[in-house]
């Protein structure tokens, strides 16, 4: 009997140790504002994470904004200067580094100057990183995007990985720029994947990637390695004007 009680207590202590804690998004954003590095693991994040700090910026801006003000753009950029790391976290609400605010006419964008990690995470709602500039390494491996996600126009300056990542909704990397090699190895796109006009300047791996609907790589440019070993596309591939090391996509396949 004593042994059974000991075992039950041990199991309980282990499960408790690995149980996810709950963290409020407002607490995280306060630390970001204060210039603190964010390092959170095994947590459920409640509330919207708005890295653009739109609500804070809006009262300081003119109520009516014309395009010729602000240097010819209505885009307001926020620089996130310190490390942002989430490992094995669940985001219950939106994670926003991009907000087009129709009421004010402004577009709010967050850029990341230090390392960004969203590893083994789950985005239950939106994950918006349109126009974001990632100046250091970024890691989105083993992560699930269950809601809408976009990296349209995003720029990745250093090492970046999307290995073993799941995109349940349409995923767009249109106009994104990858300055270093990027891997999508073993990832799954449940719906359309859009890489139109994307630039891979140091190679890309789609090894064993499953595109369960369409793959759009129209106008895509790849320099360096282009690994599509084991890649599966259920429907159509739009590869018009695609260039793989200066060759068309079809010619690249024939060469292989």
Image (tube, rainbow, N blue to C red):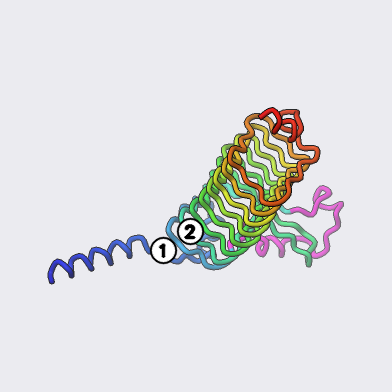
Label 2 residue SS: strand
8 or 244: which is nearer to us? 244
When the figure is inspected, residue 20 is found, relative to residue 216, above or below; the finding is below
- x 71%, y 63%: residue: 58
Start-end of magenta stretch: 49-75
Count neighbours of disc 2 (C-alpha within 10 A) and say few if under 14, some if 14 to 19, many if 20 or more.
many
Label disc, if present, on residue 128 of the rendered structure: none
Count neighbours of disc 1 (C-alpha within 10 A) and say few if under 14, some if 14 to 19, many if 20 or more.
some
Quarter of the rendering occupied by the N terminus? bottom left
Q: Quadrant of residue 147?
A: bottom right
Image location of residue 179, percent across then percent down: 65, 35
- x 71%, y 65%: residue: 59
Q: Which residue is mark 2?
A: 89
147 or 31: which is nearer to us? 147
Q: Which residue is mark 1?
A: 20
Q: Measure the C-alpha gap from mark 1 to mark 2.
A: 8 Å
- Does the magenta run of residues contain 70? yes
| Circle 1/circle 2 CB separation < 8 Å | yes
């Amino acid at each position: 009997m004593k042994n059974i009680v000991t075992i039950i207590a041990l199991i309980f202590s282990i499960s408790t140790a690995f149980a996810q804690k709950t963290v409020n998004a407002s607490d995280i954003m306060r630390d970001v504002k204060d210039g603190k590095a964010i390092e959170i693991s095994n947590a459920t994040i409640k509330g919207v994470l708005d890295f653009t700090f739109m609500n804070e910026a809006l009262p300081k801006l003119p109520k009516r904004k014309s395009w010729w003000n602000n240097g010819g753009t209505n885009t307001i950029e926020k620089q996130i200067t310190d490390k942002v790391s989430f490992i094995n976290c669940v985001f219950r609400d939106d994670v926003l580094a991009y907000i087009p605010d129709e009421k004010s006419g402004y577009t709010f964008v967050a850029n990341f100057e230090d390392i960004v990690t969203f590893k083994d995470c789950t985005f239950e709602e939106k994950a918006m990183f349109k126009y974001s500039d990632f100046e250091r390494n970024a890691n989105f491996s083993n992560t699930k995007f269950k809601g809408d996600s976009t990296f349209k126009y995003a720029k990745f300056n250093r090492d970046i990985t999307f290995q073993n990542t799941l995109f349940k909704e349409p995923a767009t990397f249109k106009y994104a720029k990858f300055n270093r090699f990027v891997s999508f190895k073993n990832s799954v796109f449940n719906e359309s994947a859009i890489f139109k006009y994307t630039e891979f300047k140091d190679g890309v791996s789609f090894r064993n990637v499953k595109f369960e609907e369409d793959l759009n790589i129209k106008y895509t440019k790849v320099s360096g390695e282009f690994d599509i070993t084991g890649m599966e596309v259920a429907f159509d591939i739009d590869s018009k004007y695609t260039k793989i090391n200066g060759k068309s996509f079809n010619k690249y396949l024939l060469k292989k």
